[in-house]
Amino acid sequence: MINGFGATDVFYSAPTIDKTGTCQALHDGRTTIFDFWCHIDLPAPLDNDLQIRIDRERYGRPLPPATLSVATSSSNLRAESDE
């Protein structure tokens, strides 16, 4: 779930797995902070952490992007076994 920060459109890109897509606005019920849902199908197993970029637009004008790194189970297991 994503906070749109007033965006009318939200997109994601995950270059680690070569995927891009459009996030869906949540209109059902009352939303407080999280008003978009981004579903990303992940291949398994992942060898590296997943890098994701969230791009937001408000009526076609870009808002500042957000980037995040998600630790994957397989990369965590490998890191623990390396210690």
Image: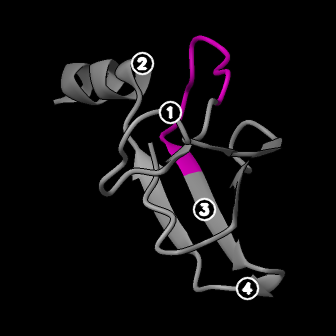
Q: Which residue is mark 1?
A: 28
* Circle 2 SS class: helix
- Spot occupied by residue 77 in the image (x, y as percentages of width and height): 29, 18
From which residue to which does the magenta span run? 40-51
Above or below, 17 relative to 46: below
Q: Which residue is mark 4?
A: 62
Q: Earlier in the sequence, mark 4 or mark 1?
A: 1
Mark identifier at residue 10: none
Mark 2 or mark 1, which is nearer to you? 1
**Residue at 67% over, 16% down:** 43
Q: Earlier in the sequence, mark 2 or mark 1?
A: 1
- Spot occupied by residue 15 in the image (x, y as percentages of width and height): 74, 50
Q: Nearer the viewer, residue 69 or 77?
A: 69
Mark 4 or mark 2, which is nearer to you? 4
Above or below, 46 relative to 51: above
Above or below, 82 relative to 43: below
Above or below, 43 relative to 37: above
